[in-house]
Image (tube, rainbow, N blue to C red):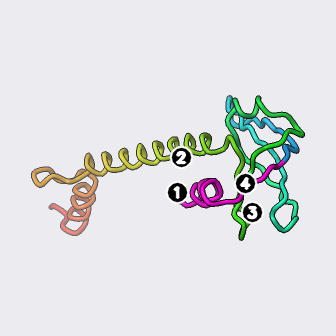
Amino acid sequence: MVGSYFASYIVLPEKFGIQTEGRVLEKRADKFMRRGVTYTIVYSFQDSQGNTIKDSRIVAREFFEKVKEGDPIRTSYLSMFPSFNTIEGVLGTIKVMVLFYAGVILTILALLVLGVELRKVRDSEPDNLFSRLEERERARSHPSS
């Protein structure tokens, strides 16, 4: 899922799209959680049909600090789908995000596998939870006199 997003919104326009010049309309630095900041550039450009496309992208802090509102910005878009576009400075940010989330997902999967392995019932040891339930059931059905 993350890979398809990455390919459609970032890689395809960058590799196969039309390059044009857009304009930075707005810069936003939004705080999230306790310490995090998301740096967003709002921009617009005209596609080959003359339509004005307005979009926004999360960018790296270094790039955010480098550009100003009104600055020209290199934009790439797919001619058939101008909504699939990107600007310079995005590719590195997306790579970092993909690597981060891939690491989180792999860590969660590793912990799940470890939990399953540690929870497996060994042939010589009865599972504590189920053996207790079985003992209670036996005690109810065969009361000892």
- In the displayed structure, 28 sits above or below 75; it is above
Question: Sequence order check: which comes first, mark 3 or mark 2?
Answer: 3
- Category of crowding for the residue at label 1, using alpha-carbon neighbours closer than 10 angstroms: few (below 14), some (14–19), many (at least 20): few
Q: Quadrant of the C terminus?
A: bottom left
Instruction: Please identify, in this view, whether the residue under mark 4 or under mark 1 is nearer the observer.
Output: 4
Amino acid bearing label 1: Gly
Q: Mark 1 points at which residue?
A: 3
Residue 115 as seen in the image, left or right of residue 75? left
- Category of crowding for the residue at label 2, using alpha-carbon neighbours closer than 10 angstroms: few (below 14), some (14–19), many (at least 20): some
> Quick one: SS at disc 1?
helix
> Quick one: SS at disc 4?
strand
Q: Name the residue under label 3.
A: 83
Judging depth in this view, the residue of 103 and 64 nearest the camera is 64
Where is residue 119 shown, x and y percent of the image? 27, 49
Give the alpha-carbon distance from disc 4 to disc 1, as whole Å. 23 Å
- In the displayed structure, 138 sits above or below 101; it is below
Furthest residue in direction left, as rendered: 124
Question: Sequence order check: which comes first, mark 3 or mark 1?
Answer: 1
Residue at 82% x, 49% y: name it. 22
Residue range highlighted in magenta: 4-22
Amino acid bearing label 4: Gln
Q: Name the residue under label 2.
A: 98
Residue at 22% x, 69% y: name it. 141
Where is residue 51 shown, x and y percent of the image? 87, 65
Q: Main secondary structure of the magenta part?
A: helix
Give the alpha-carbon distance from disc 3 to disc 1, as whole Å. 18 Å
Question: Sequence order check: which comes first, mark 2 or mark 4?
Answer: 4
> Quick one: SS at disc 2?
helix
Q: Name the residue under label 4.
A: 19
